[in-house]
Image: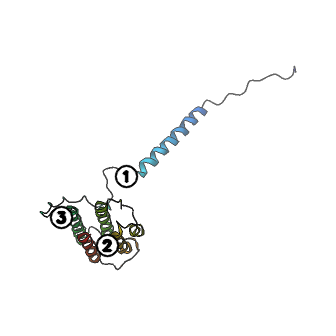
Amino acid sequence: MPGAELVDPVPYAPWWPWVAVAIILAVAGWFVWVVRSTRAPAQDAPASVPPPAPAAPPAPKNRRDPYAALRGTTLARLDEVERRYRAGDVDVRGANLEIRYVLREFATGRTGVDTSTMTAAAARADRRTRPLSTLLENTSMPTFAPTSRARLSRSLDQARNRVRTW
C-alpha cells in the first residue's frame, strides 16, 4: 500500500455549531411564543363570566328554611341578569347562559352535587338534581341555537319559580 496514503478526515466547517445553537434557540423561542400567545393575561377576565354574586341578604327570622340565604342570593343574581339584559350589556343568549350558571350554582349549594357541567339528561337521572333538568332543557335552545324566538322573561320566571319552590 505504498501508493495509498492515509488522509485525515475533513473537519466540519466552524459555522455548524452556530447553526445548531440557532436552531435550538428558534425552537425555544417558538415554544415561548406559543405559550404566551395562547394564554390570556390574568387580569383580563372573559366577558362571558358573570360578575361576582352580590352579598347575601340577611337571614330571615324564620329558621325553618336552611336555604333562605342561598335563595335570596340566587334571586338577587337573577335580578342582576335581568338588569344587565335590559341595559343591553348581554343579549338573550348571554343572559340564558348566565341563568344556567346561576341555577347550577344554586343546585350545587342546594344538593351538594357538583352540577357545573351536568347535562339535562344527567340531572334527570339523579333524583337530587331532577328539578334542575327542566330548566336546563328550557334554557338550552336560546343558549345554543343559531337563532331563537325565546323570551328572556319566560326563562327568568321559570328560574325564579324553581328557586322559590325548591
Tell me if residue 22 comes above or below residue 155 in the rendering.
above
Q: Earlier in the sequence, mark 1 or mark 3?
A: 1
Q: Are marks 1 and 3 in contact (CB under 8 Å)?
A: no
User: Quarter of the image holding residue 93?
Assistant: bottom left
Image location of residue 82, percent across then percent down: 24, 70
Q: Earlier in the sequence, mark 2 or mark 1?
A: 1
Badge 2, how many Cα within 10 Å: few under 14, some, many 20+?
A: some
Badge 3, how many Cα within 10 Å: few under 14, some, many 20+?
A: few
Find disc 2 in the rendering and name its residue: 92
Q: Quadrant of the N terminus?
A: top right
Disc 3 residue type (three-letter): Arg
Q: Any mark on residue 116, and which?
A: none
The secondary element bearing badge 3 is classed as loop
Disc 2 residue type (three-letter): Val
Q: Any mark on residue 40, and which?
A: 1
Q: Residue at x 35, y 66 (%)?
A: 129
Pair 2/3: label in front:
3
* Most foreground residue, 53 or 29: 53
Image location of residue 105, percent across then percent down: 30, 61
The secondary element bearing badge 2 is classed as helix
Outermost residue, front side: 64
Q: Residue at x 42, y 47 (%)?
A: 36
Outermost residue, top side: 2
Tell me if residue 54 comes above or below residue 155 in the rendering.
above
Find disc 3 in the rendering and name its residue: 64
Disc 1 residue type (three-letter): Ala
